[in-house]
Image (cartoon, rainbow, N blue to C red):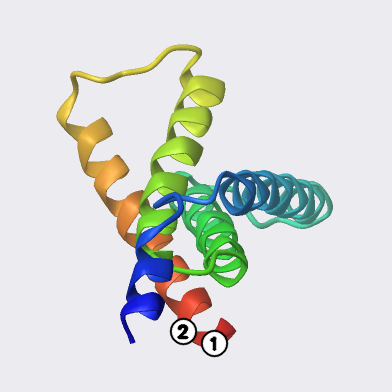
Amino acid sequence: MAKKNEKEGRGMAIEPLALVQGVILSQLLWLIMSIGSAIVVYFSSWPASQSTLAILAHLAVLGGGFFSGVRCSKRAWLHGVVLGILVFLIFSYVGYGELLLMTWPWWKALLKMVLVAMLGGITGGLLSS
């Protein structure tokens, strides 16, 4: 029994490979969904809105968090939180050209993104075992 507990205590809290794979997958999901929505908007009369793009971004982060949770061996919720922060920093840099760290809407959006990514990580961690 003691050996098992010692084994579990070793290692890193965050597995970088699972985290990088989740970030890459969320970026690919965002790219695929944005191209798909651009095609739909171009060929139909459906207008693109800010809320639709936000939903697509949250779905991409949910998918990346899920994948990261599946790939990690423990602390899937922490992988989801870190993934949500990293992806949101990438999204905000790409979207605004700079990081808007001092505005309340930015922090509120970051919190929403982290919660969605944590939910994806927890779900992926539960379904992997």
> Which numbered circle lies on residue 14?
none
Q: Are marks 1 and 2 in contact (CB under 8 Å)?
A: yes
Q: Amino acid at mark 2?
A: Leu
The residue lying at 49 percent from left, 21 percent from top is 93
Q: How many other residues sit within 10 Å of disc 1, few (<14), some (14-19) or many (≥20)?
A: few
Residue placed furthest toward the front: 2
Locate residue 27: give its quadrant. Answer: top right
Residue occupied by mark 1: 129
- Front residue of 73/64: it is 73
Query: Residue at point 33% right, 75% down?
Result: 5
58 horizontally vs 99: left or right: right
Q: What residue do we see at 43% from left, 12% from top?
A: 98
Q: Secondary structure at mark 2?
A: helix
Residue sitting nearer the eye, 42 or 12 = 12
How far across and how far down the image is residue 6, in percent?
A: 35, 68
> Residue 78: image x %, image y %?
36, 57
The quarter of the picture where the C terminus appears is bottom right
Q: State the quadrant of the N terminus.
A: bottom left
* 14 vs 117, nearest the viewer: 14
Give the residue type at disc 1: Ser
Kindly identify which numbered label has been placed on residue 126.
Answer: 2
